[in-house]
Image: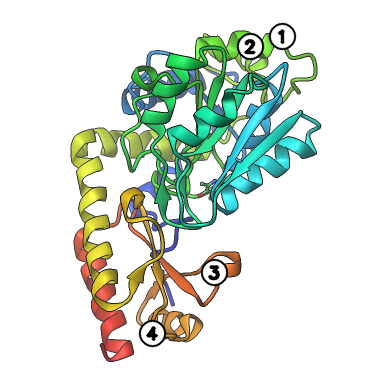
Amino acid sequence: MYKKLFIPGPTHVRDEILQAQAAPMIGHRASEYSDLQADLTPKLQTMLYTEQRVYLYACSSTGMMEGSVRQASTQRILNTVCGAFSKRWHQLTAANGVPCDKIEVPMGQAITPEMVDEALSSGAYDAITIVMNETSTGLMNPIQETAALIHAKYPDVLILVDAVSAMAGAKIEFDAWGLDVCLAGVQKCFALPPGLTVCAVSDRARERALQVPNRGYYFAYDQMDKRYEKHQTPATPAISLLHALNAQMDAILAEGLENRWNRHKEMAAYVQDWARKHFALYSDEKYLSHTVTNVENTRGISVADLNSELGKRGAMISNGYGDLKEKCFRIAHMGDLTLEDLEWLTAQIEDILGL
Ligand SMILES: *Cc1c(COP(=O)(O)O)cnc(C)c1O
């Protein structure tokens, strides 16, 4: 049976978007392809409030998490860890042989400007990684405030942001906030099939990359730049997904960006209220996510059983991540889901659990 996905990626994909992928194949050095990329890129720039470059990579988000740390630093990187995905960024920075250290807070807590200030004050770092929305805990870090602090006190530190479960669901003003790298795979708030990553990169991050000798090749900005103005990519792009993304960006801009951000906030507020009423919220109330809610399983229900019952009714939620399995469950409210979808879902959960 088809299940509507209320999991934090991949998310529910509308039929029109699935069909947009079925456009006839085109050659990636043909003008038809350049026309597609030239049409699409400005829409992404509009959504990210940026006039700087936005690259398209054929990979899931983790690919570009790796690509970005390989070309960000000639000194050391500070990785900030507040859950599973920000931890992954630290692990893969180290696995690439890039000098790095981490600061870490317990799951459910945020990375604050004060913590970042203290860590950067050693002067050892020229780049920092921060997850905007920690999907494993349902927490949104105060990226804008942290970026402002970094610009005021540590102007040489590049700011790399994993916005995988935030981009296209929450406002990110790339230029005004002064971000240097902001990346996201499209299977979350963009509500597309997986396999494509969107990445905005500042001019100063592109300059920094040129000073990093072993910056790699596939993700290297200077390689991408050889084709950027021709509206092409050096390696074969995920053409079918780009058709889908182009169609989805039209829908996103037609919805209106502010409307889209507000719809996500409304869905979040609804699910948070529901969770407070029947269970509890796991993460710090001050930093709750707009796109996914981590519900603490205060009733000791079997999350696995709940999910299999939901499956019979055509829906799927997520168990807690890693150590939080069965201690929590996660309801995603991102992409093309609506408040009505969430009202339907919570009614099903109440019915199944007899709440
Ligand atoms: C899903 C997710 C990732 C990993 O994305 P992939 O597309 O599976 O590589 C990284 N960071 C965050 C915050 C995520 O939610």
Q: Please identify, in this view, whether the residue under mark 1 or under mark 3 is nearer the observer.
A: 3
Residue at mark 4 to residue at mark 2: CA–CA distance: 51 Å
Residue 69, how many percent across, how many down? 66, 28
Residue at mark 1 to residue at mark 4: CA–CA distance: 54 Å
Q: Element at badge 3?
A: helix
Callout 1, which amino acid?
Answer: Gln
Give the left or right position of residue 82, taking residue 268 as reference.
right
Asked whether the residues under the numbered discs 1 and 2 touch, taking CB atoms below 8 Å apart as contact, a structural biologist would say yes
Of the residues under marks 1 and 4, which one precedes in the sequence?
A: 1
Q: Please identify, in this view, whether the residue under mark 1 or under mark 4 is nearer the observer.
A: 4
For the residue pair 338 and 78, the one nearer the viewer reads as 78
Q: Quadrant of residue 330?
A: bottom left
Name the image colouring.
Answer: rainbow
5 versus 182 height, above or below? below
For the residue pair 269 and 101, the one nearer the viewer reads as 101
Callout 4, which amino acid?
Answer: Arg
Q: Which residue is mark 2?
A: 208
Of the residues under marks 3 and 2, which one precedes in the sequence?
A: 2
Residue 180, how many percent across, how many down? 50, 20
Q: Residue shown at 71%/35% (left/top)?
A: 93
Q: Quadrant of residue 196?
A: top right
Residue at mark 3 to residue at mark 2: CA–CA distance: 39 Å
| Within-10-Å neighbours for mark 4: few <14, some 14–19, many 20+ | few
Q: Quadrant of residue 244?
A: top left
Q: Element at badge 1?
A: loop
| Within-10-Å neighbours for mark 3: few <14, some 14–19, many 20+ | some
Give the left or right position of residue 289, taking residue 120 as reference.
left
Q: Element at badge 4?
A: loop
Q: Residue shown at 37%/29% (left/top)?
A: 144
Of the residues under marks 3 and 4, which one precedes in the sequence?
A: 4
Q: Which residue is mark 3?
A: 324
